[in-house]
Amino acid sequence: MSNTLPPNLQSSIFDYILALADDELVIGHRASEWTGLGPILEEDIAFSSIAQDELGHALTFYTLLEGLDGGDADDLAFLRGSAEFRNAQLCELPRGDFAFSLVRHFLYDLAEAVRLDRLADSAYPPLAQAAAKIRQEEKYHLMHGRTWVQKLARGGDEARAHLQTALDLAYPAAAGLFEPVEDEAELVAAGLVPPSAEVAASWREVVVPFLSSAGFTVPVGTSHLGGRYGQHTEYLSQLLDAMQALYRTDPEASW
Amino acid sequence: MREWQFNPYHQRIEDALEQTATPPPADTEWGVWEVFQQDRRGEHHHHVGSVHAPDAEMALVLAKENFVRRGPCVNLWVVPSSAILATAYEDADIFQTTSDKNYREAGGYRSFRQKRRGQP
C-alpha cells in the first residue's frame, strides 16, 4: 500500500498513532522526573536516558501525524489539554517510589516491544518504518527493566514488598495500553495495525510467566481504562501543567 | 589469601594494603566495576570508566547507558576494580627510558633504516 490512505482510514490511523505518541510522551515525562533523584547516580543516568528515548519515540510518532495533517508536532505535544490526550492512564500515574516507576516502565516497554514487532509489518509504510526503527531501542529498555526486577525480586522482603505493591497498581492499569481506539477494526481489516487483543495476549504470554517465576503474584482484573477516549485522572492535568507551561508561555521562542 | 579493598582511582597501593586488615563495611555500598568498550570487532577493548553495581550483570546494564549512549560500540566488558593491581605513582620512574636503549627499538638497526630509505 502507498503512503496515501483512503480518507476514512486516515482519520482512524491518526487516532491510533496519536495514542502511541501520547503514551510515549507522558510516560517519558514521568520517567524524566527521576532525573537528579535516581536511587544511585548510575541508574539516575540510565533512567534519564531511557526517558529521553521515549520522548524521541514520541517525536517520531508526532512527526508521522504532521504528515496526516495533524499540524505541528510541538503544538500536538504542548498545546492540547488533558481531555484531548489519548494515552493510557498507566502512563500518567505519579512516579511513586522507584519500584513503581520501574515496574510500570517494564510493563510498558514490554507492551511497546510486542506492539512494535507487529507494527513493523504494517501495510502503512511510514508506520512500519517508524516501528522498525523504534523497536531497536526497546531491546535495551527490556534488558534494563528485566535485570532490575529480577535483582530486586531476590533483594529481600522489603524490596519484594515494594515491587509487589507496585505491581498491584501497575498491572491492572496496563490493560489501558491495549484499549482499542474507536475504529481499530477498520485498521485491522486493512492490515495497518494488529488487533489490540492479540497484542495484549502476546504481552501476557511473556509477562505472566516472568513475574510468576520471579515469585510475584500476578494481580487479576483491569483498571484505569478510558485513556484512549480522553478520560484521565487528575494526575494528567498536573503533569501537563508542568510539562507545557514553558511552551505555552511563548510558543514562538527558539531553543 | 587476603581480600583486597582497592580502588585504583582513590587509593594508592599502600593505602589499599593498610585497609585490607579492616575492610570497610560493604553491605550498603555496591562494588566498583571497571568498564571496557570495544568500538569495532577485532579492535582492542579500551577503558572508558567505572560504575557502581551490585553484580556483574547489573554493571553491564548500567555501563551501557553511562558510557555508550552514543556509539560506536560492539562489545562491553566489566571487571571488578578489586581485580586490578596497579603500580604506585612513586615508582613511575621504572617506565623511564634512560641513556642509549636504541638497540631495543627497530629504528636502532641499520637494516631497518636502509629499508625505510628504500635501499636493498
Image (cartoon, rainbow, N blue to C red):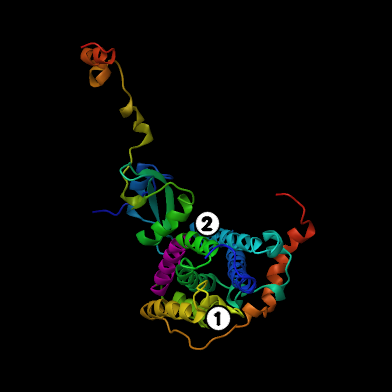
In the shown orientation, is residue A33 left or right of residue A207? Answer: right
Which residue type does callout 2 highlight? Ile
Q: Chain of mark 1?
A: A
- Label 2 packing within 10 angstroms: few (<14), some (14-19), many (20+): many
Image quadrant in which the N terminus of chain B is located:
bottom left
The secondary structure that dominates the magenta segment is: helix
Q: Chain of mark 2?
A: A
- Numbered disc 1: secondary structure: helix
Where does residue B120 sit, x and y in percent of width and height?
Answer: 20, 12
Look at 50% across and 58% down and name the residue there. Answer: A46
Residue labelled with disc 1: A185
Q: Are marks 2 and 1 on the same chain?
A: yes
Q: Percent position (x, y) of residue A160? A: 44, 77
Pinpoint residue B117: horizontal percent, then vertical percent.
28, 12
How far is the residue under mark 2 from the one under mark 1?
A: 41 Å
Please report the residue visible at 68 percent of the width from the left and 69 percent of the height from the top. Answer: A239
Q: Which one is closest to the eye, mark 2 or mark 1?
A: 1
In the drawing, does residue A54 fall left or right of residue A141?
right
| Front-lying residue, A212 or B13 | A212
Instruction: Give the labeled residue for mark 2.
Output: A45
Q: Residue at x 63, y 62 (%)?
A: A62
